Image (cartoon, rainbow, N blue to C red):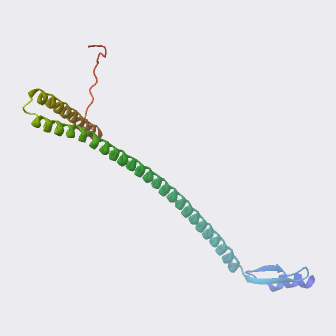
Amino acid sequence: PELKNLFDKNWVPDGMSAIRMTIDSERELILAAPERTVYNAVYRARQAFVLLIAVELFAFAAYIYLVFASAKRSVEKTLLEERLKKVQKADEAKSLFISSMSHDLRVPMSSSIGFTDLAYDNAENPEKTREYLKKVRSSNEHLLTLVNDIIDVNRIENGNISIKEEAYNLYRS
C-alpha cells in the first residue's frame, strides 16, 4: 500500500489526470492522461449523447408523421369508398328509373299508335273513330304527364326549380 501511494503521488505529473481501473481486489491499473484529454473525452461523450437524443427525437417524429399520414390516407380511402358506393347506388337508381320509365312511356305510345290505326281502319264509322280518337288523346295526355314529370325531376336535381309556399284549403271544392 505504501508503494502504491508513493506511485500515485509521484508518478502522475502536474496537468495530468489519473484514471484508476480495478482489475481485481489486489490489482489496479492506473492510466495517466493529460487533463484536457479527459475533458475532451467527457465533452465528446456528452456531444454523442445529445446527438443520440436528437436522432431518437427525429426517429420518433418520423414515426408520428408516418402514423398520421397513414391514418389520413385511411380516412381518405374510406371517404372515397363511401362516395363510390353513393355513385353506384345513384347509377342503379337511375338505371331502374330509366327501365321503368321506358315501359311507362312505351305503353301510351303503343296505345296511341294502335288506336290511330283502328281509327284509320274504321274511318267510315264516325262513332267508333271518335271513340278511338278519345283513347288516343287520353294516351297522349298520359304520355305528356310522364314527360313533364321527368322534366320536373331533372329540374329538381339541378336546383332549377323554386318552391312557392302559399296557403291552400284542402276542403275547398
Q: Residue furthest left?
A: 124
Of 112 and 119, nearer the camera is 119
Q: Position of residue 146 (x, y in %)?
A: 24, 36
Q: Position of residue 42 (x, y in %)?
A: 68, 74
Give the mark count.
0
- Horizontal placement of 84 versus 155: left or right? right
Question: What residue do we see at 13% from left, 29% from top?
Answer: 128
In what quadrant of the picture does the C terminus appear?
A: top left
128, above or below 34, in the image:
above
Question: What residue do we see at 73% from left, 83% from top?
Answer: 33
Q: Position of residue 99 (x, y in %)?
A: 31, 45
Of 92 and 66, nearer the camera is 92
- Horizontal placement of 128 versus 74: left or right? left
Q: Position of residue 154 (x, y in %)?
A: 26, 40
Of 121 and 79, nearer the camera is 121
163, above or below 11, in the image:
above
Question: What residue do we see at 83% from left, 83% from top?
Answer: 29
- Horizontal placement of 5 versus 47: left or right? right
Q: Residue furthest right?
A: 1
Quadrant of the rendered image containing residue 11? bottom right
In what quadrant of the picture does the N terminus appear?
A: bottom right
Quadrant of the rendered image containing residue 168? top left
Q: Residue furthest top?
A: 172
